[in-house]
Image (tube, rainbow, N blue to C red):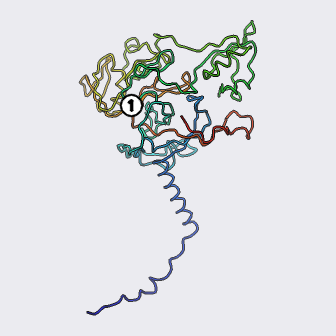
């Protein structure tokens, strides 16, 4: 049998390729970096910063965090048409960075943990309607209750399933302070008592009366800081703020639900306020509830907005689907109850209700940098003791 060897290729095929231009090499490098950063940000870790004091003194304004997507599992994108490495707008502008032309059903890939009580969680705020769910504003709070739990607050103490919840070590509430002279700023700083709206973050007195009593009407502080102040000779009185039980607050959920045709306030208001709240059961996937005029306000927003059930409407305290009164419902996903550690300075689930599972972004795990916005000089802005601090 004859064997024929390959012919030598023409000279044009063996000539070396023309090297890439510098612009092409830079373009390829930038494209690779953007793709890699996008994948890392989506599937593993993402950096966040703390903009408000709702988690003070556990997390401080100016803390920079790493949030793990691996713990609870990354979500597949709901809004795929988006400028990479943006959230709602293109950097430095008000131009939307995404298009809603394509909306996909979001799925969660496997993680190595479930959301647990006392986890510090980043999530998309569920009440925001102007953006798709995966692009809504990010909040960070502590998970107080998980699916199936019964949440209650009595005199500012949270209870889970009838038992007192474990309080975070740096939990804060608000106080009125009365002294015989203005408090030195150093004392406030040492005790972690901050007013971010005041000059240099130092709380200023509300007034001084005729008896030379200086009042600070609303100071947010830990129990340890309150105990320290009570021992000081210049302190006349320190009163912790408490709302009385039975005094309803129209701002708390479900009193705050924005019904399409709201019933009179007296018919929908529960005698709940931020310090005395519930009991309220947190919905769980697969759980079936009976809908009645007494609880319709709790479930209306869940069914119509978070579970995307079509044809949902509200009339005279009743939920309707396609014109028929809805008497029972089975939940399609889990829900969570979130609260800030700064209990009297936090907009959380007490005000806007449950967080759906598909809004959970990830678990806050590490503070990698902390910058004090009120520090007097550049060199003192870094809070060195908080660098690479594990979040608990």
Q: Is residue 304 above or below residue 240?
A: below
Is 157 situated above or below 31?
A: above
Q: Nearer the viewer, residue 145 or 316?
A: 145
Residue pictured at 56% horizontal, 41% vertical: 366
Task: Specify the quadrant that holds the N terminus.
Answer: bottom left
Quarter of the figure with residue 105 = top left
State the image coordinates of residue 376 (x, y, percent, origin top left).
Answer: 74, 34
Q: Which residue is mark 1?
A: 335
**Left or right of 23, for residue 72:** left
Kindly give the residue lying farthest to the left in the view shown.
324
Query: Residue drawn at (46%, 44%), measured in percent from left and top?
Result: 69
Q: Residue furthest top?
A: 211
**In the image, residue 116 lies at what x, y percent?**
44, 33
Depth check: 121 or 273 in front? 121
Which residue is found at the position 70% from the left and 10% from the top? 236
Count the numbered circles shown: 1
Instruction: Please state the horizontal and vertical placement of residue 279, each as a whole percent of the image.
Output: 40, 18
In which quarter of the view is residue 58 placed?
top right
Q: Is residue 176 left or right of residue 265?
A: right
Picture quadrant of residue 59: top right
Residue 233: percent from left, percent from top: 74, 13
Badge 1: residue crowd in 10 Å (few <14, some 14–19, many ≥20)? many
In the picture as drawn, the residue positioned furthest to the bottom comes out as 2
């Amino acid at each position: 049998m004859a064997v024929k060897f390959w012919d030598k290729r023409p000279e044009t095929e063996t000539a070396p390729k023309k090297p890439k231009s510098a612009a092409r090499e830079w373009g390829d490098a930038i494209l690779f970096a953007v793709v890699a950063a996008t994948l890392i940000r989506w599937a593993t870790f993402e950096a966040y910063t703390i903009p408000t004091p709702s988690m003070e003194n556990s997390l401080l304004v100016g803390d920079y965090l790493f949030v793990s997507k691996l713990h609870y599992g990354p979500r597949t994108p709901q809004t795929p048409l988006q400028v990479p490495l943006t959230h709602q707008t293109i950097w430095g502008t008000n131009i939307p960075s995404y298009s809603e032309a394509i909306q996909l059903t979001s799925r969660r890939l496997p993680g190595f943990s479930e959301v647990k009580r006392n986890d510090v969680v980043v999530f998309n705020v569920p009440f925001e309607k102007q953006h798709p769910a995966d692009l809504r504003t990010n909040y960070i709070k502590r998970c107080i209750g998980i699916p199936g739990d019964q949440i209650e607050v009595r005199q500012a103490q949270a209870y889970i399933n009838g038992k007192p919840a474990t309080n975070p070590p740096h939990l804060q509430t608000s106080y009125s302070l009365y002294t015989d002279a203005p408090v030195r700023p150093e004392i406030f700083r040492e005790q972690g008592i901050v007013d971010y709206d005041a000059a240099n973050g130092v709380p200023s007195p509300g007034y001084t009366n005729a008896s030379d009593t200086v009042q600070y009407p609303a100071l947010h502080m830990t129990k340890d800081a309150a105990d320290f102040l009570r021992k000081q000779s210049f302190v006349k009185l320190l009163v912790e703020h408490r709302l009385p039980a039975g005094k309803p607050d129209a701002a708390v959920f479900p009193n705050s639900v924005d019904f399409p045709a709201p019933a009179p306030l007296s018919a929908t208001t529960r005698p709940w306020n931020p310090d005395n709240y519930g009991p309220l059961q947190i919905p769980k996937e697969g759980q079936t509830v009976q809908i009645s005029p007494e609880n319709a306000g709790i479930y209306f927003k869940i069914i119509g907005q978070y579970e995307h059930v079509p044809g949902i409407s509200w009339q005279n305290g009743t939920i309707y689907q396609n014109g028929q009164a809805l008497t029972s419902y089975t939940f399609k996903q889990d829900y969570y109850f979130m609260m800030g550690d700064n209990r009297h300075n936090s907009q959380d689930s007490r005000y806007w209700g449950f967080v759906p599972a598909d809004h959970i972004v990830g678990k806050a795990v590490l503070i990698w940098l902390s910058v004090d916005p009120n520090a007097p000089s550049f060199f003192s802005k870094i809070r060195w003791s908080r660098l690479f601090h594990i979040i608990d």
